[in-house]
Amino acid sequence: MDKKMVCGILLAMIGLVFSSCCLIIAALNPWNYNGIDGLLGSLLGTKTLIPFIISLIVMVLGLALCFWRAFRNEK
């Protein structure tokens, strides 16, 4: 495993942990944000929607880096 693969794994794990934390915070604090109920309303009400989106982007970038390094075509 090379350094870029390890970096991708770490990015994916950090994104997974932070997105899980945002979802847990939103799930434990039910909120009605201007008539929006459910998980989206809770994410908006607890102001964790933007960190949730950022952490999902970080997780996807980490996974993409891992797949790119794992399945690249070396000749």
Image (cartoon, helix red, strand yellow):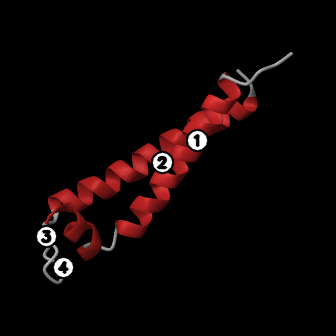
Q: CA distance from mark 1 to mark 3?
A: 31 Å
**Could you tell me if residue 10 is visible in this image?**
no
Residue 8 position within the rendered picture, expressed as x and y whole percent measured from the top left: 62, 37
Q: CA distance from mark 2 to mark 3?
A: 25 Å
Comparing labels 4 and 2, the label whose residue is closer to the camera: 4
**Residue at point 61%, 30% (across, down):** 67
Q: CA distance from mark 4 to mark 1?
A: 32 Å
Disc on the earlier residue, 1 or 3: 3
Contact between marks 2 and 3 (CB within 8 A): the answer is: no
Per the image, the residue denoted by label 2 is: 15
Which amino acid type is marked by label 4? Tyr
**Residue at point 49%, 60% (across, down):** 54
Which amino acid type is marked by label 3? Asp
Q: Is residue 22 left or right of residue 17?
A: left
Disc on the earlier residue, 4 or 1: 4
Q: Residues within 10 Å of mark 2 (few under 14, many from 20)?
A: many
Disc on the earlier residue, 4 or 2: 2
Which amino acid type is marked by label 2? Gly
Q: Which is nearer the eye, 65 or 20?
A: 65
**Residue at point 20%, 70% (across, down):** 41
Q: CA distance from mark 4 to mark 2?
A: 26 Å
Per the image, the residue denoted by label 3 is: 37
Per the image, the residue denoted by label 4 is: 33
Which amino acid type is marked by label 1? Gly
Residue 28 position within the rendered picture, expressed as x and y whole percent measured from the top left: 16, 59
Q: Residues within 10 Å of mark 1 (few under 14, many from 20)?
A: many
The kind of secondary structure element at disc 2 is: helix
Per the image, the residue denoted by label 1 is: 62
The kind of secondary structure element at disc 4 is: loop
Comparing labels 2 and 3, the label whose residue is closer to the camera: 3
The kind of secondary structure element at disc 1 is: helix
